Amino acid sequence: MSIEKEGFFQSLVEAKIWAIFKLSTTLDIRKGSETMAKDFKKRACLEPIVPYVPGKPIEEVERELGVSNIIKMASNENPLGPSTKVMDAIKGYLQKLSLYPDGNAYYLKQALAEHLGVTDKNIICGNGADELITFSGMAYLNPGDEIIISHPTFSEYEFAARVMDATPVRVPSVDFCHDLPAMLAAITERTKIIYVCNPNNPTGAMLTHAELADFMKQVPPHILVVMDEAYYEYVTDLAYARSIEFLKEGYNVLIFRTFSKIYGLAGLRVGYGLASEEIIADINTVREPFNVNAVAQVAALAALKDQEHMKAVQAANTQGRDYLAKEFERMGLSYVPTQANFIFVEVGVDSKALFQKLLQQGVIVRTGDIFGYPQHIRVSFGTEEQNKRFISTLEETLKQWDS
Ligand SMILES: *Cc1c(COP(=O)(O)O)cnc(C)c1O
């Protein structure tokens, strides 16, 4: 062996010894910290919060079950994906990724303002509407304050309250719809925010303009009404609330919408809030400067400009909605009439057991037990092909249940 080579091996050995030594000292430090007492606790108000348990990636489930072609109809995602114009806009932006995003989302707000007939001062953008829901709590809730929500509804409102040590007050729904008179009756002097989810998740039920107009007249001025309209673009019922009118009439409303659903951008996280200048200014105080990433802003702007795609998604959704409703009727299953991109159906068997059986066959749905309805499932509409596969899989599985 040449001297040169020997020297190389020598230094390799040295490097190895050094690495082992380094590793062992690192491990020592870890060990030390494991045995050290943690003499602090998380805030007591966080105790009731159960962290969101995300499902496994589809690829992982396919590998574990040895199936392919899984269809996910569990998270109200857009089965057609985003517009190709959005994808082009994103590609065109990649060069600029080293720059911080526009903290004011200037172009997106301008476009939204024009699209909706409000001013940019009436708009706040968020890292998904979820972030804005949390912001509403951060801006207005003191410990001991109350929020009023319907039950069942979207879980993020309770989260926004709990994080701030405020108390969620649940009002049972009637016919799967918000019971607005009962929600009014639940108001106390501690009530700060009423969250109205319209159409409601997980039921898909809708409140009309007349119902909400009557409601708004009776809400006292110490209360903010949040109208979460994550699914508003899917609504085809003409009686649907024209919430921006409430804003223009001077009511204390905060409207949330999102690019996650009909625009197919759930993975990028961008939503927006609409309210009076004063309310938007309040909420802006809790916003981090760069909360909406640059790609999300570029994508949302391109998505908004492609209303053709939006309408195509809407039409496909309406078709899927009518198809599933008709099939459920044929199968004798009762469902909640829906205006969203999902449907809440009573399957007459334990939804968790059904979930497992459907999963084995590559169909993922949401069980109703987490919403307090153990015999219901929530199904997001897919493509025509996915909808058909869901129905045939469901029908076969339920048939085998009986025998
Ligand atoms: C999906 C959804 C949202 C928010 O979605 P983001 O992805 O955070 O924009 C808000 N409210 C309801 C009721 C939803 O279903």
Image (cartoon, rainbow, N blue to C red):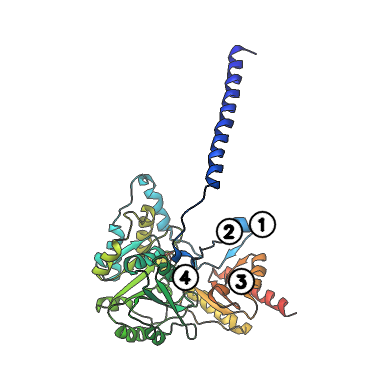
Find out whether the residues at labels 2 and 4 contact each other: C-beta distance under 8 Å. Answer: no
Instruction: Say which of marks 3 and 2 sits in front.
Output: 2
Return the residue found at the far right.
403
Which residue is identified by label 3?
390
Q: Is mark 2 within 8 Å of ligand 1?
A: no
Find out whether the residues at labels 1 and 4 contact each other: C-beta distance under 8 Å. Answer: no
Residue closest to the eye, 123 or 67: 123
Quadrant in the rendering for residue 296: bottom left
Label 2, residues with CA under 10 Å away: few <14, some 14-19, many ≥20: few
- Sooner in the amino-acid sequence: mark 2 or mark 4: 2
- Sooner in the amino-acid sequence: mark 3 or mark 2: 2
Q: Whole-percent x and y of residue 220?
A: 29, 82
Residue closest to the eye, 383 or 298: 298
Q: Whole-percent x and y of residue 104?
A: 28, 57
Q: Residue 56 got which mark?
A: 2
Instruction: Look at 34% across and 69% down and name the residue there.
Output: 142
Find out whether the residues at labels 3 and 2 contact each other: C-beta distance under 8 Å. Answer: no
Q: Residue 155 got which mark?
A: 4
Label 4, residues with CA under 10 Å away: few <14, some 14-19, many ≥20: some
Q: Quadrant of the C terminus?
A: bottom right
Which residue is identified by label 1?
64
Residue closest to the eye, 301 or 101: 101
Horizontally, residue 33 falls left or right of residue 285, namely right
Amino acid at pointer 4: Ser
Find out whether the residues at labels 1 and 2 contact each other: C-beta distance under 8 Å. Answer: yes
Amino acid at pointer 1: Glu
Is 221 placed above or below 34 here?
A: below
